[in-house]
Image: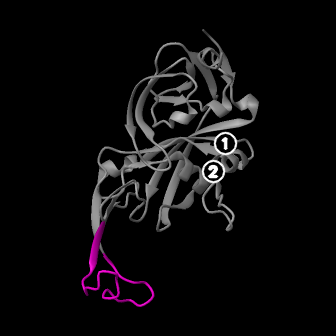
Amino acid sequence: MSGHLDLNAQGLRLFAGRLYNHDYLWFSSIEISKTASTVPLIHNYALTYAITGYSSSAYRVAPQYAQDLARMPAYATPARGHAHVTFTRFTQNAINSRTLRTDDAPRGSNSPALGWRLVIDPVWRGGLNSNSAEGFRFYLFAQSSFRPPAVVRLGKKGCPVRLEWEEITPAVALLKDEPVRPTHAINPLDVQGEIQTYYPVAIPPHLVLQFADIAQDWFVFSGEHRVHVPRRFAPVSGNARRKTA
């Protein structure tokens, strides 16, 4: 099987992105009892919403991902943190936000309900920790008219993050029969080929593959970059045709 796909000719640009959180980055990747932990892996839906500045209407109870993403001028891969991420644990004292008391809970005891959140420490290029210069790595597919931002807010507390971009050009994808391991995390819903090996991480709204070997799908190769092309931007592969036959 062979084929090539010129993304630029389709009005798309491809960027390699680096993300540096300039404050404590917190979102509930995993919640066990009273502890909420943040893993160094950012779901591509959350990242895409932040980069495009898109917010759901106030009347919605929850995001409508399929409809929202179709309206956005850009689409990101999940962002994978570097190997030297460090964490800080904050202790929370759960109190009644209206009365500011702890003794009016159903159990009737005047005792704090302690909880903890594990957050990712700030990262910035050229910081004291030289390893932190790696930041979070991901890729962005964007319409030609879209200009990727340099600063956005992300996470539960609106953490300010700095974004750096390198355009990959020419952005020409090849259809590969043999398995390829992309240089980024994968949303399995973006894959139309065959996932042969993978390492899943369960984070809302659904799991992300930290690493994956994918065959019979489209990829852009440029220097160190091996970028999987999401199914929304690629023609139907032979493997996908067999699945739907």
Mark 2 belongs to which amino acid?
Answer: Pro
Residue 44 in percent (x, y) is at 53, 46
Residue 180 in percent (x, y) is at 46, 21
Q: Check the image and report above or below for 121 versus 102.
A: above
Taking the spot 49% from the left edge, 30% from the top edge, the residue there is 225
Look at the numbered disc 1 and give the secondary structure of its residue. strand
Discs 2, 1 touching: Cβ within 8 Å:
yes
Which is more toward the observer, 157 or 112? 112
What is the number of the mark on residue 1? none
The quadrant holding residue 113 is bottom left
Q: Pointer 1: what residue? A: 142
Q: Check the image and report above or below for 165 versus 96.
A: above
Q: Residue 30 lies in magenta, yes or no?
A: no
Q: Residue 95 lies in magenta, yes or no?
A: yes
Look at the numbered disc 2 and give the secondary structure of its residue. loop
Which is more toward the observer, 112 or 43? 112
Closer to the camera: disc 2 or disc 1?
A: 1
Q: Is residue 142 left or right of residue 96?
A: right
Q: Check the image and report above or below for 245 versus 38.
A: above
Taking the spot 45% from the left edge, 43% from the top edge, the residue there is 137
The magenta segment is 93-116
Taking the spot 37% from the left edge, 49% from the top edge, the residue there is 40
Q: Pointer 2: what residue? A: 148
The quadrant holding residue 104 is bottom left
The quadrant holding residue 200 is top left
Principal secondary structure, stretch drawn in magenta = loop
Q: In terms of sequence position, does the residue under pointer 2 or pointer 1 come before the other?
A: 1
Q: Check the image and report above or below for 114 versus 120.
A: below
Q: How many marks?
A: 2
Q: How is the image coloured?
A: one colour
